[in-house]
């Protein structure tokens, strides 16, 4: 059951990031209907405004996705989540011993 909650949270975070990317793309293209002012950018990723290299990387990723350029081997989020869970368990065991 906890696993399903974690997946739901990751999906929510992904949706937030997709909205952020859409707002950045709209802002970059000068679209007056941009939703960048709805708080997504300012609340979740304000550092992007101060780091033009990071912003450029995100915008390039958006352009690549628009062109249909994707990695051949997408990341395995389930395996990554399992590794993170094991690392957290190991950390908690060490913490409880010391």
Image (tube, rainbow, N blue to C red):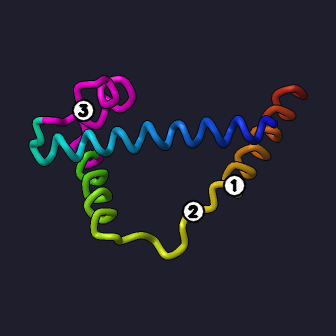
Magenta stretch contains residue 88: no
The furthest residue to the bottom: 72
In the image, the segment drawn in magenta is: 33-54
Residue 59's place in the image compared with 41, above or below, is below
Name the residue carrying label 3. Answer: 35
Q: Residues within 10 Å of mark 1 (few under 14, many from 20)?
A: few
What is the quadrant of the C terminus in the image? top right
Query: In terms of depth relative to the viewer, which is nearer, 57 or 63?
Result: 63
Kindly identify the residue that appears in the image at 81 percent across and 37 percent down. 1
Where does the image place residue 85, in percent across and percent down from the top left? Answer: 76, 43
Q: Do the residues labelled 3 and 2 touch (CB within 8 Å)?
A: no
Per the model, the C-alpha gap separating discs 3 and 2 is 29 Å
Q: Image check: 8 left or right of 42?
A: right
Element type where label 2 sits in the image: loop
> In the rendering, which numbered label is found on residue 78?
1
Per the model, the C-alpha gap separating discs 3 and 1 is 31 Å
Q: How crowded is mark 3: few (under 14 residues within 10 Å), some or many (20 or more)?
A: some
Name the residue carrying label 2. Answer: 75
Residue 74's place in the image compared with 40, above or below, is below
Q: Are marks 3 and 1 in contact (CB under 8 Å)?
A: no
Q: Are marks 2 and 1 in contact (CB under 8 Å)?
A: no
> In the rendering, which numbered label is found on residue 56?
none
Element type where label 3 sits in the image: loop
Foreground tag (3 vs 1): 3
Where does the image place residue 96, in percent across and percent down from the top left? Answer: 87, 26
Q: How many labels does the image show?
A: 3
């Amino acid at each position: 059951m906890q696993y399903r909650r974690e997946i739901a949270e990751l999906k929510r975070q992904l949706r937030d990031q997709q909205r952020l990317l859409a707002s950045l793309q709209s802002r970059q293209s000068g679209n007056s209907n941009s939703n960048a002012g709805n708080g997504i950018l300012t609340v979740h990723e304000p550092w992007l405004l101060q780091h033009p290299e990071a912003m450029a990387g995100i915008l390039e990723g958006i352009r690549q996705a628009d062109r249909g350029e994707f990695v051949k081997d997408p990341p395995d989020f389930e395996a990554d989540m399992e590794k993170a869970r094991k690392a957290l368990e190991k950390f908690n065991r060490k913490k409880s011993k010391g």
